[in-house]
Amino acid sequence: MKRFVVLFLIFFSIRGWSIDSPQVYPTHWWVGMKNTNLQLMIHRERVGNEKISMIPYPGVKLVKQTKAENPNYIFIDLSIGATAKPGNIKFRIDNLQSPEAVSYKIFEYELKPRNKGNGQTRAQGVTAKDFIYLLIPDRFSNGDPSNDVITDYRDRTSDRKDKFSRHGGDFTGIVNHFNYFNQLGVTTLWLTPVIENDMPLMNEWGNNVAGYHGYWFTDHYSIDKRFGGNEGYKDFCNKAHAQGMKVIQDAVYNHVGNHHWFVLDPPMKSWFNNSQGDMAPNHREEVFYDPYASQADKTQMLDGWFVPHLPDLNQRNPFVASFLIQHAVWTTEEYGIDGWRVDTYKYCDEQFMNNVNAALEKEFPKVTVFGESWVNSTIANAYFTQNNITTPFKHNAKGMLDFQVCFAMLAGMNEKFDWLTGVNKIYTTLSQDVLYKDPMNNCIFLDNHDMDRVFSVIDEDWKKMKMGFNWLLTLRGIPQLYYGTEVLMKNKKVNTDATVREDFPGGWADDKAKENRFTKEGRSDKQDEAFDYVSALANFRKNSSAITAGKTMQFIPKNGLYVYFRYDARQTVMVVTNTGDKDVKPDWTAFAERTKGFTQARNVVSGKIMPLNRLEIESKDSYVFELIR
């Protein structure tokens, strides 16, 4: 009987230990990477008290192991040489914790072959030849109601009547509308973050809000199951690429949700920036290039927590940096995404940002990275990208979200023309492009998920909206349209962002057919006019060498009339906007530097051809013309 009890205890000790497998990050890797170094994070209860060894694998070397302050973590550095082949590396864990249990166990780590389509059909990069459509997956279309609620997540609600709740949009819903994007002339889809947000409702602006927007990460290596999970995202990316569309993923390096597993069980004290508690940053990007800035102000900017429930990651910690950089590389290889939009760029450690950008470019030479920094000046916007400014630190990002051009276009639509107001803001902002290495890499936009919707900002004035569309799709850079702007979705933020993040009408099975904005029948006359206008202009842009790769020449605005040209050896496009109160017949000889040799102008939206010297521009009207000899 005594022997039976001992055997019984040994059996359950072995079983209990064997099911407690370690969590390994990255979850797998690839052979043939240009960077041969790989750092594995092993997460398991008291793993630091155990011994890990690697069973010999050709081409792979175990370089070193590092124990963390928290015994639940250990870091393993590997070198994966050029001769390594795909397969499973085996690691042995010797159990030093429970003498009565089995003495060791084996876990495997997979090395995969790299995808041969990188740079061709995936990881292609996004350029000025593209037209980006920004959408919030939860609010765009619900193609699979079965994943609206995931019972093992903390937030188990989905209620479209509650603007702060999740609404059920997912990858399948987006795929269902690929034809819509093609009609609109979209080439690239930018989704707000798709990584798991297993967070409870959080208090923001006095409201209990779900993480439907995706910016509260809780597990970097899991795609949120409410969107379709890892396999659903892979399928989405593959189908987008098969349609000839590109995918931009939203990155957040600055912070995570406070229910992330490494917040609940931190590897070490320095994993987060805690020098100021959860005090907010000062939001002043000037501290980075101001020659008179104090270190205290710079530290507050870098170490401040964006909001109290988003712990600020310490990217100066080499293990944090390695985790984030490897995840960016892993995601690009795993899903084949074509570009990254980096949230809260200016709040991140500067050298870290250069390192992650360089790591991505090393493995994926064509992949695009542009940062999001809501800044106060053009010099600030240029500072965070490749620029012509003499500063002690030089950033290597190729482009940024161009908030200054956005603000200038809004001013051009809304403000009365004067020396520095109205369309003169567009003129003066573009004149500062001398600060950038290549302003064509900047992403330009009229609104986004953090701003009042542009149609409301301009008081629902269609003529102003047409001006905005013309500038957005013809100015230098990569144009981005916020979902629904093409069908005149409206609203301003009122104590919440949710009012500018409403569901796209027609994306849910119970939406009324007459309100389905995906179809001509479900749009009003004005909404359909807006859709057709964007579609015509965007599809013209696709094949316009002058707009997508040409030069820009602008003329000083006079009496509210703003004229600029996009041109190359093959094509000249003229954009004319009359923001004044009177109709004008311009003196076209004033623009002879670019119009010489041309006799006619074709309206690229209507197709109508007019003699160039007889063009008249009505008050508050705007046109895009292709000049004809």
Image: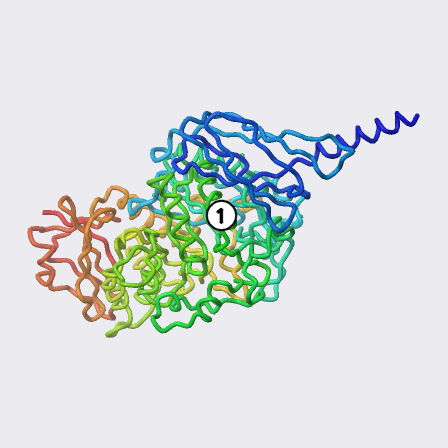
Depth check: 618 or 128 in front?
Answer: 128
**Looking at the picture, how far across and down is residue 420, in whole percent?**
26, 73
Depth check: 280 or 335 in front?
Answer: 280
Q: State how the image is colored.
A: rainbow
The quarter holding residue 7 reads: top right
Looking at this rendering, what residue extends furthest in the right direction? 1
Q: Answer left or right for 339 relative to 149.
A: left
Q: Which residue is mark 1?
A: 324
**Looking at the picture, how far across and down is residue 591, in whole percent?**
11, 60
**Looking at the picture, how far across and down is residue 627, in whole percent?**
15, 50
Q: Residue at x 9, y 51 (%)?
A: 599
Q: Is residue 134 visible?
A: yes
Secondary structure under tag 1 reads: helix
The quarter holding residue 37 reads: top left
Depth check: 179 or 529 in front?
Answer: 179
Q: Residue at x 54, y 60 (%)?
A: 273
Q: Is residue 307 above or below residue 171?
A: below
Q: How many marks?
A: 1
Q: Residue at x 65, y 41 (%)?
A: 47
Kind of residue at badge 1: Leu
Q: Is residue 227 visible?
A: no
Quarter of the rendering occupied by the N terminus: top right
Label 1: few (<14), some (14–19) or many (≥20) C-alpha neighbours in 10 Å = many
